[in-house]
Amino acid sequence: MVISEAQLVRGGSFLFHPAGSLPQATPEDCDAEALAIAEAARDFVDGEVMPRDEAIDHLDLDLTRDLLRKAGELGILGIEIPEAYGGLDLEKKTALLVLEQMARQASFSTSYGAHTSIGTLPIVYFGNEAQKAKYLPKLATGEWLAAYALTEAGSGSDALGAKTTAVLEDGHWVLNGTKAWITNAGFADVFVVFAKINGTHFSAFIVERTDPGLSTGAEEKKMGIKGSSTRTVILENCRIPEDRLLGGKGKGARIAFGILNVGRFKLGASSAGAGKRVLEYTLKYAGERHQFGKPLTAFGLIRQKLANMAVRIFVGESMNFRTIGYLDEALARTSWESETGGTDKMKAIEEFAVEASMAKVWGSEALWATADDAVQSFGGAGFSAEYPAEKIYRDCRINRIFEGTNEINRLLIAGTFLKRCGGPDGLPLAEPPAPPSRAEDPALDLAERIKAQARMLAALVQREQGPKILDNQEAAARLSNLLMEAYATESAAIRAARMAASGHRWAGLAGDLALVQAQEAWARVQAEGALLAAELVEGEALDAVLAGLRDGAPRPRPLAPVRARIAEALVAQGRYPVTTL
């Protein structure tokens, strides 16, 4: 995927270009190297992780450490670490493919993600030369494992409200405070800890487990992901050398929120990977379980659930690869050879904060819906811990809280998007283009119509309230939902159209998956748009907006036969078949 200067993609700009006019990465674009590493990750999960599923979930931390070290021997802990420090420095899409494989065991995936992403990447992007040379080679191999200590009991979503302090005394930082809900705390060797210098300047520090004054509490008893270590990290006059300040005094917010953007798009990827496993074992059970003399897969409402699972996976994949493609292209225009390489790369990632948050929110809610459909398809067995549906239901619930709650992320989507629409160089919200006709492709046609509706309503928000819409959080969330529906539907429709153009073996199935998403999304956009408009205007002005929402509304197509075709393909394959592996 090559982007010309004329087509340079900006965060949020997807809403202002005709569908297909901007480059878009898809899973079908992955090269041989990325696929080979993904296959190695799959073999590792199949051979080393899944056979130990029960032991992992019984919180065998020695086993988790051992598995992470084996992952390091394979190179899959160092995918995003520069080569100069023992890593592979590969594209983000490779990390995405690996995360999809890891996601099949939720607890191990959580440990893996906390180490490779939020634990390691602050040092990758913000560490100085000495810090990188000391820590990254060991983090790449798994000799040392990492954790990220931001949250406190009184400051979750309000991260800047942290009470942990750092004071410089005799060439050492002295840290005091308690961090809560810290993943990998039971075995991590290195912690990225956030504290306020002299109670004021929010900053990040590298703390080692052996530093005096650091201890951890007992393991939390959690609803799900029971095999991942989650503890408090206690800092009591914890003394660390002065050179362990990460990124500079007062740079903590930049580090914390920048790294969370990375974690958000990765959470979208792992949600899609987990969804594939859920669909596979639901297909198996529904095919073997008979009622009224027929397998469950023969019943229309079970087929509907199976088809919807596949739709969510296809759409999530399409969104994730599109976002990762934008990130990879932006990162390719930076270099580690530059003195500002880490900062430049973080700026490139921050440009797509809106898309990262959309991938996280959409993916985590799609997986939750899929887990719920799995429990319902299993019936009474779905409520039993003897069957896998119960476990994923518990395990995936945390995803809507991880990396910033979905409520916070919805506010970030709306607020960041509107901010980018302001000023002379902002996105062109004031004069939204008319949607081109896409009558030959019903999914693309609906995607264009949804984008037009989202532009119209975003312009209304900007005109009536602008960023002040965040004071009405319900209205801001509705705007975010409209933007997500536009991004999700367009991503799926474009991918399906390209598969059709290339004669892909699953092009017909992809077209069906994109069509179900598009038509269901259209109905959701109509409802969300009307309710958002009612928060902004009234009387004749509201009537005009409602008329605009109805204008040119396409006739709905019957989706039952489309879902039936999807379900038939799924049953025949026994899994989600639109895969590159």
Image (spheres, rainbow, N blue to C red):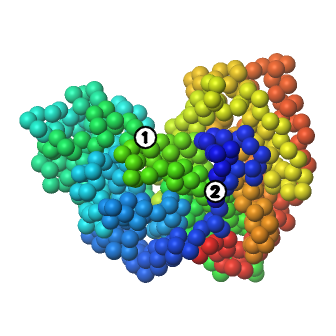
Q: Secondary structure at mark 1?
A: helix
Instruction: Tell me where residue 209 sits by quadrant.
Output: bottom left
Inspect the image, locate mark 2, and give the three-letter code of the amino acid beneath it.
Answer: Val
Q: Nearer the viewer, residue 209 or 477?
A: 209
Percent across and percent down for residue 384 are 51, 68
Instruction: Tell me where residue 431 sits by quadrant.
Output: top right
Percent across and percent down for residue 127 are 30, 48
**Image position of 492 with respect to 462: above or below:** below
* Disc 1 versus disc 2: nearer the observer: 2
> Which numbered disc flags the more N-terminal residue, 1 or 2?
2
The residue sitting at 54% across, 41% down in the picture is: 351
Percent across and percent down for residue 176 are 19, 37
The residue sitting at 31% across, 71% down in the picture is: 69
The answer to whether residue 549 is left or right of residue 94 is right
- How many labels, in total? 2
Is residue 286 in view from this perspective?
A: no
Q: Secondary structure at mark 2?
A: loop
Res 257 label: 1
Q: Nearer the viewer, residue 326 or 372?
A: 326
Q: Quadrant of the C terminus?
A: bottom right
The residue sitting at 47% across, 59% down in the picture is: 395
Percent across and percent down for residue 168 are 15, 33
Disc 1/disc 2 C-alpha distance (Å): 29 Å
Q: Quadrant of the N terminus?
A: bottom right
**Image position of 106 with respect to 366: above or below:** below
Q: Which residue is mark 2?
A: 2
Q: Nearer the viewer, residue 488 or 394?
A: 488
- Estimate how packed mark 1 is, as few (under 14), some (14 to 19) or many (20 or more) residues with alpha carbons within 10 Å: some
Q: Give the residue at the far left of this rendering.
A: 170
Inspect the image, locate mark 1, and give the three-letter code of the amino acid beneath it.
Answer: Phe
The answer to whether residue 240 is left or right of residue 201 is left
